[in-house]
């Protein structure tokens, strides 16, 4: 049915917004990266939310990197080496002078690449210096160490990532990355790196009170999908007039950003709300294709759900909502790239993923651990119109 399906990592023109952006915002566009087709394969890559990131070296040479996937399920900035051509980024070195390289763990495999210092600008926010991961052909990283290859397939490529990189802005500080110190072709796990050299959530590097979280907003779209959609990522929670969280339902999460969802008589205590995944990954009882696991109900299904805080966390809240699940075969035939109702059967007694389809028609906020906002102390997830 599909020559290639790029379900996103881990892990957003119908109703699109054309309004100007504030200084603390980035445009988010759900569309198809034309470079995926140019790569020589027929690609169906729905629900890929992209942003553009400005990267500069120490000599103020800059490039704008488009089609960077926005991921609220990971942290850190990771970019293909080819997109940074012409920049003289400096490698991050350990105290003993060895190059630092990173193995980043995602649901579909790993990304291996060098850690380098860069000046990065997100939207209209002031530029900030932070470590980023540079991967793919042209990366200065040595051969992948055996410990990293045990995580699955190497997804450090244009087709596997589904774009030029990943901007991870989850409600976490760090996570999912193992650092190595490398000398020539020999790499060992780093044991005592300076914390300022680690790949962290870029949001925590922001100033002006915008470092306590983000809000991702996408417009509502028809059940048949839309050719594309535009929304915005807003930095900061309750620090400006455009990032107020009044009216959001706040859910306390575990250390990994998971909350709880009940549906069809079952409760899934490890439920992620993750923009970096293209399909709703659900253990629901409804028809699906046995070879691809994609849901294929004959009519649009509306499944009542209840969202609540992770057990043992606060605030204590329970909110009724619903999910729509359509037939992916008929939806693919529309030629659209943005859908709010595509899903894949993922059997589990405890986990589910409310991926990018869930975001359409909603605003989802993520509070950073150790910070606070109107949603309460982080880590916390807030949803407007759940």
Image (cartoon, rainbow, N blue to C red):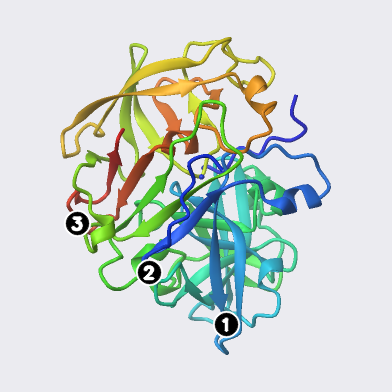
**Labels 1 & 2 near each other (Cβ < 8 A):** no
Whether residue 41 is visible here, answered yes or no, is: yes
For residue 343, side relative to residue 191 (left or right): right
**In the image, which disc is placed on residue 232?**
none
Residue drawn at (51%, 45%) of the image = 12
For residue 120, side relative to residue 298 (left or right): left
Q: Position of residue 327 (x, y in %)?
A: 59, 18
The crowd level at tag 1 (other Cα within 10 Å; few <14, some 14-19, many 20+) is: some
Front residue of this view, candidates 71 and 27: 27
SS type, badge 1:
loop
Distance between the alpha carbons at the discs numbered 3 and 2: 21 Å
Q: Quadrant of the N terminus?
A: top right
The crowd level at tag 2 (other Cα within 10 Å; few <14, some 14-19, many 20+) is: few
The crowd level at tag 3 (other Cα within 10 Å; few <14, some 14-19, many 20+) is: some
**Labels 3 & 2 near each other (Cβ < 8 A):** no
Q: Position of residue 159 (x, y in %)?
A: 71, 48
Q: Which residue is mark 1?
A: 57
Front residue of this view, candidates 208 and 20: 20
Q: Position of residue 362 (x, y in %)?
A: 36, 39
Along the polypeptide, which appears first: circle 1 or circle 3? 1
Whether residue 175 is visible here, answered yes or no, is: no
Q: Position of residue 377 (x, y in %)?
A: 19, 52
- Above or below 97: residue 223: above
SS type, badge 2:
loop
Residue drawn at (55%, 37%) of the image = 278
SS type, badge 3:
strand
**In the image, which disc is placed on residue 372?**
3
Q: Which residue is mark 2?
A: 23
Identify the image quadrant of residue 368.
bottom left
């Amino acid at each position: 049915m599909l020559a290639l399906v790029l379900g996103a990592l881990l892990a957003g023109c119908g109703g699109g917004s054309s309004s100007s952006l504030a200084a603390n915002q980035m445009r988010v566009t759900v569309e198809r990266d034309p470079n995926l087709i140019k790569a020589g394969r027929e690609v169906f890559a729905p629900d890929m939310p992209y942003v553009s990131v400005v990267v500069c070296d120490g000599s103020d040479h800059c490039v704008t990197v488009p089609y960077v996937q926005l991921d609220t399920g990971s942290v850190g900035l990771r970019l293909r080496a080819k997109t940074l051509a012409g920049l003289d980024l400096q490698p991050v070195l350990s105290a003993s002078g060895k190059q630092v390289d990173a193995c980043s763990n995602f649901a579909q495999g790993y990304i291996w690449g060098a850690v380098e210092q860069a000046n990065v600008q997100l939207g209209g926010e002031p530029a900030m210096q932070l470590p980023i991961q540079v991967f793919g052909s042209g990366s200065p990283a040595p051969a992948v160490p055996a410990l990293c290859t045990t995580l699955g397939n190497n997804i450090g490529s244009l087709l596997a990532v589904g774009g030029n990189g990943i901007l991870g802005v989850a409600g976490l500080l760090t996570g999912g990355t193992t650092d190595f110190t490398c000398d020539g072709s020999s790499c060992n796990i780093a044991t005592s790196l300076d914390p300022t050299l680690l790949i962290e959530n870029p949001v925590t590097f922001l100033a002006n009170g915008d470092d306590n979280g983000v809000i991702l907003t996408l417009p509502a779209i028809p059940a048949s999908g839309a050719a594309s959609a535009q929304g915005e990522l807003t930095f900061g929670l309750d620090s400006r007039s455009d990032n107020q969280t009044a009216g959001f339902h706040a859910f306390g999460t575990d250390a990994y950003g998971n909350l709880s969802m009940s549906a069809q008589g079952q409760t899934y205590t490890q439920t992620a709300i993750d923009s970096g995944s293209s399909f709703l990954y659900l253990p629901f009882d409804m028809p699906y294709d046995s070879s691809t696991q994609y849901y294929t109900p004959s009519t649009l299904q509306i499944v009542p759900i209840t969202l609540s805080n992770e057990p043992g966390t606060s605030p204590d809240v329970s909110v009724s909502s619903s999910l729509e699940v359509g037939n992916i075969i008929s939806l693919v035939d529309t030629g659209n790239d943005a859908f709010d109702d595509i899903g894949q059967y993922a059997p589990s007694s405890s986990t589910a993923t409310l991926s990018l389809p869930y975001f359409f028609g909603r605003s989802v906020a993520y509070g950073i651990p150790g910070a606070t906002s109107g949603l309460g102390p982080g880590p916390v997830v807030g949803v407007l119109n759940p």
